[in-house]
Amino acid sequence: MPLLHVTDLRTSFHTRNGVFRAVDGVSFSLERGETLGIVGESGSGKSVTCYSIMGLVPQPPGRIESGSAVFDGVDLLRCTPAQSRAIRGKRVAMIFQDPMTSLNPYLRVADQLVEPLRIHESISGAEARKRGLAMLEAVGINDAERRMNLYPHEFSGGMRQRVMIAMALITRPELLIADEPTTALDVTVQAQILELIQRMQRELGMAVIFITHDLGVVSGLCDRVQVMYGGRIVETADTRTLFHAPRHPYTRALQRSIPALQQKGSELYTIRGLPPDLSKTSPACPFAPRCEFAVEACVTTPVGLVEVAPGHAHACLRAQRGEI
Amino acid sequence: MPEPILELRDVKTHFPLRQGFLLKRDAGTVKAVDGVTLSITQGEVLGLVGESGCGKSTLARTIMQLVPTTAGTVVLEGRELTRGSDAEVQAARRHLQMVFQDPYASLNPRMTVFDTLAEPLRVHRVCTPAEVPARVTRLMELVGLAPRFMQKYPHEFSGGQRQRIAIARALALEPRIVIADEPVSALDVSIQAQILNLLSQLCRKMNLALIFIAHDLSVVKHISDRIAVMYLGKIVELGPAVDVIERPLHPYTRALVSAIPVPNPDVERTRQRIVLPGDPPSPIDPPAGCAFHPRCPYAVEACKAAVPPLIPADPARTVACVRLGEI
């Protein structure tokens, strides 16, 4: 049985300007210990997917219209608040892009670091502090004994992200959701944090969902990748297949627009048009208006993910018919 | 070698730090830019890379004369900006324009595209008022925006389109040099590619010199002719773009290059990665000698003794490392 099984998740935001379908029928599953990358541009629904699973979508204006997210037998979208509290923050943890806004500036690092322990385990203050100290050392903070008593603003960006990771991992979660954890950091610090996440994953044997827009980060870290566009998964495959034999035109276009993979000085490939308007979605392909291979049928026919090889599925009508 | 149009000679920009409320006392100096010598020729694209806090944005602001220079000279086409009067600097800015990182913050939300693009034309009186609409139309076409959007406000455009407006504004006065400070960092990959293509086309078409500041080395390599790598206010390596990225000589450049994740799982999983320990030190109290030595895997005693000068490593490249040739 998979650790997490998400089926037909639909999350929308009801605003004065209409209904925005941020996540529009997303299904995937994750095994224990596996690393899944979710890649997409802003507005593709990659973060909202994970926020929905974690119960972090503000309702209203958000609304989870349908679907289920079963974590180890419990549907996180329908369980009682008590069930949900026992899982979120203990068995499933999350880290965010900006460590400055996700740490409480009024609390000393030690206090917020051990908060998950105090809530989820009956543990004495002294014991919690000891575990907190060990965790800070594990994530590579030198002089942790003294630094525990500092406030978040006294840490650098990379250090704060380490504190966030320590806080997320202190309850030894089975699943870690990382939402662009290195986007705000310098490349050299990014390399440190990626190594840290990989090492902690090996030590704790946890599964990781890694949300990013950087295909480079995904290539080194993830076992499997799913590409999102306009609130849907358009392609999913193991990392090697996705990089070497992508089938969906959007995945291919994304790869062709990265400077690192192109001849120096050559014209970069650009995707024409604008990102989709999420208030006007149809069951047809969301990428069709920008796709260079689109035909009449792409705009009119509903399309879903179809498995073309074991573990490799995509939602391109023409590739499914074998036309491209 | 062609005549440089912009030359920096040993430029230093220091900011004094003061502590206290009424009786302020000196608490040190932030040496944001600390002795940079650089030149750029007509039509050249110079990439400037380094981590946050290394002084690359302060260097841009120093060139623009937006912050006072502590020492050294900035010479634009033979005119020394650092000693010029305000009027001379103002006149020189016509040839020296800037594009900023965040197109949401750098455009005035209360001005239409027309007002934004017409303002520099009016300030510098480059044409008669009657010619302004035609000029604005040409500018919008130049950056790939439909002139019918002239009366729209910035919030009606996407991030990529706003960056096009910012580029059009920088080009309004037909400058000789444009400084672009992280112009694509706030944009998505597919939009980033459009802006990079536009910038390199414009450089070719208008024979424009471009100083391109970014932290993403693959982007910088793609667009630049030469690359300068900065660490804590100093240039540590300067040379042709391909050489610097593919055969880096300074240990810091090597670490920086190896930190970029490669979007190819086969390469990414097998290659050796140099992970630097710690964070960059504070520019208030930089380490003695080579500022990089506390994090450098090759550091020896000599590195702590004196600041290494930039020395030629091959005809086109200079590197500031005492162990050059040994490592």
Image: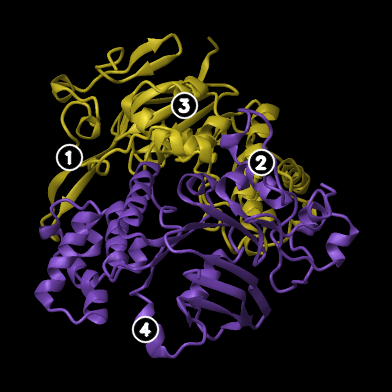
Q: What residue is disc 1 on?
A: B285
Q: Quadrant of residue A93?
A: bottom left
Q: What residue is disc 3 on?
A: B245
Disc 1/disc 3 C-alpha distance (Å): 29 Å
Residue B67 vertical placement versus A82 (above, below) = above
- For mark 2, name the chain: A
Disc 4/disc 1 C-alpha distance (Å): 47 Å
- Which secondary structure, mark 2? helix
- Which secondary structure, mark 4? helix
Which tint is chain A? Answer: purple
The structure residue drawn at horizontal position 65% and vertical position 58%, both measured from the top left corner, is B158
Dot 4 or dot 2, earlier in sequence: 4
Q: Position of residue B317 (x, y in %)?
A: 42, 15
The structure residue drawn at horizontal position 26% and vertical position 67%, both measured from the top left corner, is A170
Residue A85, disc: 4
At label 2, which amino acid type do we have?
Arg
The structure residue drawn at horizontal position 37% and vertical position 89%, both measured from the top left corner, is A82
> Is disc 4 on the same chain as disc 3?
no
Q: Nearer the viewer, mark 4 or mark 2?
A: 4
- Crowdedness near tag 4: few (<14), some (14–19) or many (≥20) residues, C-alpha within 10 Å: some
At label 1, which amino acid type do we have?
Asp
Residue A108 relative to residue B90: left or right = left
Q: What residue is disc 2 on?
A: A256
Dot 1 or dot 3, earlier in sequence: 3
Q: Nearer the viewer, mark 1 or mark 2?
A: 2
